[in-house]
Every structure is written in structure tokens, then in C-alpha cells.
Image (tube, rainbow, N blue to C red):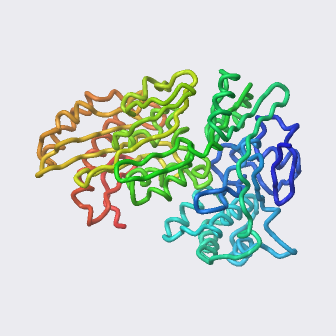
Amino acid sequence: MNSIIINEVPYPLDLIPPHTTLLRFLRDHIFLTGTKEGCAEGDCGACSAVVLEQSDEGSRFKAINACLVPIHSLGGHQVWTVEGLSTRNELHPVQSAMVKHLGSQCGYCTPGIVMSLMEAYYRKDIKEPWQIDDQLCGNLCRCTGYRPIRTAAESIVNTNPQDAFTSRQAEVSQTIDHTVDGQRFLAPVTWTELWTGLANNPNATLVCGATDLGLDITKKHAQYECIVALDRIPDLKTITVDEHQIRIGAAATISDIESTLQDTLPALTRMYRYFGSRQIKNRASMGGNLCTASPIGDSAPVLLAYDSIIELRSAQGTRTVPISSFFKGYRQIDIQDGEILSAIVIPRPTSNWHIRAFKVSKRREMDISAVSAGMAVQIVDGKIQNIRLAFGGMAATPKRAHRTEDALNGQSWSMESIQAALHFLKDDFTPMNDHRGSAWYRSQLAQNLLVGFYEELQSQNGPHLALSHTGTLLLEQR
């Protein structure tokens, strides 16, 4: 029987259509209405619930947006909502903290905030104050204000709790193969199951975290003949690091990439800090972000700067392509019928490579880029031996600025060289006008980001150089 365990109660899913989200199941089928719907697109956090997942470090709780997750993606898993936190008529410590610190007024957003705090309560990796901000940035509150909520969060993190929840163990992922009214949901756990499923359903829609597909369900009311979820195949979620390279499984979540590679790939994790909310990053995958082929996706520019390799796999075998040739056109990628993106391989840069990532958007958090960039330079004896300048938001695809790179290669690493090469960016790109920025604005941003790259490397031990929303350089002391 296909079922889900919610607040320690099993619920069968055999009659539930595949396009049903966790939120709709909670509210419409089992009438747990503490979980709210606000934006229905993963921005407000009112729908936050917590799922227990298995990892290399053991079982752990993760807050997710219930409005975006197809219910069958969680088949066999344990999920908690705000109704399941109190035990023996006693409030859970995170609920008590919200009461004590006056963190709630109208209460509409409170259940989602409480569930985000539940993840924070059981996390063991919150070491810095900014991690509390990141934990809560996906939860909007219109009336209380964030100070008392943040104070409540500060009071419950790093308390090393030992209670009934810490003894819970995540279930081993099982194969889900479910059809209702001609609509199929398949979540294989082996490569053989995947290839068989794809062969029998050539028009299947592939999904990992569903943070993109979920929007089609909630906003466009989309329904699919067959959905194949890739996030239960262990190899697709594995991150391995050796002395030569880093291999990231395509279904590895952004939050796992952040925590695992913070010290190994700082430019990548710097970009991912502003990728989205904690709830989104607990579901979104690097492979999914690349396969949407968005020209403003956050992963591609920094992966281009790292000169990454894309691994593609099918029943016939594996092939690799450089990421620089993976994007073929607007929303078009080099992936053939029967193939999936299985991993991203990043060569470990040597010590004379300097790599940075930049994102400019109208808001610092929870926003789509106007322009993003990944930049890498190899400096030998004061000269630029190699340089890679990759941008998002400047063309129909994420793209490197080859003419600018050619102009800089072999030149001295100096502001004079950078300034002399800026005009080549106009030859590399013809950006578009849209509601996120005019062509002039994007072009100016690209130039300022290149200047900012140079300035930041020159002042690594001094103030951090940030970029304002108008593209001017600002000093921001950290």
C-alpha cells in the first residue's frame, strides 16, 4: 500500500491523484488546516511542514513548502505539521519560545514559522547568526515583525535536544508506482526501474524537488500523464570529494550542497546562500536548476567559472559534455531522448585560481537574478594566465564572455587592464529589456561586476565589496 505518515498516523494514498500537493492533501483530505496557503508558490512559508529524511549523518528534519510538493513524492516518509508538535498537552519548545517572546499576533503565518523553527531546533550545524536569518528568510510575517521571531529562534538553536522526536528514524526509500485515473507517478530506487519506467513512458515528465513543477500545478493547474521522480536513486543524491574533483549527484539538494561543500567550493555556496529560502533549498536540486535551462538560473554561471563537466546517463551508458556547450539555446540543453542529467563534476582548482560568484537582484533574498556572474582567474607572476567570465541574465543562455576573456589573457592583473577590457563586454552580450532591468542596466551591471571581482580579490582581508541594486560598488564591512 502506498501511504504517508503524518503526525505519526498513516494515511493511504492509493486513491489520491498524482498532481495533488501535500498542502491540498493536508487541508482537503485529512483536514489538518493549521498548515496555511498564502502565495502557493513557495515564497511566504505559511505552508511549511517538516519531513524526516535519511542522510549520511543519520535521520534529520527538514522544513519544506507543502504547497509545491506532490504528495506521492513523500510516499513512505514521516511528515509533521503544527498539529503534531505538542505532546501530552504540552507545547513543543519551539511553540513555547514563540509564546514567550511574543512572536505571534494574527497567527496566520505562525504555524509555518513554528515548523521552520522545528527544523532549526534539531539542526546541529547552526554556528553563525546569519544561519538563523537564512533559516527564517522563507517565512513572511506582516504584523508581528521579525525581531521577536528571531529572538525566539535564538533561544532554541544549539540546545542539543533529546526528546521523542530525536529518536525517530527515517524510513528507507521505497519504490512508488501509483496510477489514478490514467495519471502515473513513478519514483524508482534503482537504475533498472528508472530505465524501464522511461522506456514504457517516453513522454514522462522528470522531477526532483518539484520546486519548479509544483508552480505549474498550483498556478497553471497542470496535470501530467506520467511523472517520474529521480530523488530516490541513491547515486543521484551522492556528493563525493577527492583530491582531483567534486562530483555532485544531480538530485542532491541545494541545502546539502551548501553544508557539504562550504569549505571546498566557497564561490558555489556563496551563490547558493541567496538561491532561495531554506524550505526551497531543502527540496531544489542542482540538476533541476540546470535542466530548466533558465538564462537567469543561479547555478550555471558559477559552474561555468569552475569549468564543470555535465554527466549524462541513459540505459546505453554515460557521456559527458562540458557545461560551456550544455546550453544550446533559450530553454534548450544538450540532452537526448532517454538521457538524464546524472551528475555535475567540478575539477578542484589549484591554489593560483581565484573564483567568485555574484548575484544582483531587487531583493537580497528570495528573488530571481537580474544579472548573476561566476568569475575565475589564474594569476601567475602578476599576469592573467587564464580567466573565465560567465554571466546569467545577459543572453538567451548562461554564457561566457569570450571576447573579454581574450582581451584579458596575458595582461597584467591590474585595474588598468580591467578598465581597458570593459568595452568588450558590449561585444560579448546583447542583453534584453524586461521588468527586471533594461539592457543598459544589465550591461552596466556586467561591467561593474567585473570591476567588483578585481576589487574584491585585491581586498580579500579588508572590507567586503558589495553591489547595490543600481550596480554601483559599495563597501560593506563584515
- Horizontal side of 193 relative to 133 (left or right) equals right
Q: Where is residue 305 in the image (x, y as percent from the top left)?
A: 33, 42
**What residue is at 42 percent from the left and 54 percent from the top?**
270
**Is residue 50 visible in this depiction of the protein?**
no
- Horizontal side of 107 relative to 296 (left or right) equals right
Nearest the viewer among 378 and 416 is 378
Q: Where is residue 289 in the image (x, y as percent from the top left)?
A: 52, 39
Above/below status of 324 relative to 238? above
Q: In which quarter of the image is residue 375?
A: top left
Where, quadrant-wise, is the C terminus in this rendering?
A: bottom left
Q: Where is residue 435 in the image (x, y as percent from the top left)?
A: 49, 35
**What residue is at 45 percent from the left and 29 percent from the top?**
319
Above/below status of 330 relative to 464? above
- Horizontal side of 206 relative to 364 (left or right) equals right
Nearest the viewer among 83 and 359 is 83
**Is residue 120 visible in this depiction of the protein?**
yes
Where, quadrant-wise, is the N terminus in this rendering?
A: top right
Q: Where is residue 365 in the image (x, y as percent from the top left)?
A: 51, 53
Count of picture labels: 0
Q: In which quarter of the image is residue 194?
A: top right
**What residue is at 46 percent from the left and 37 percent from the top?**
296
Above/below status of 144 relative to 327? below
**What residue is at 49 percent from the left and 55 percent from the top?**
258
Above/below status of 7 relative to 103? above
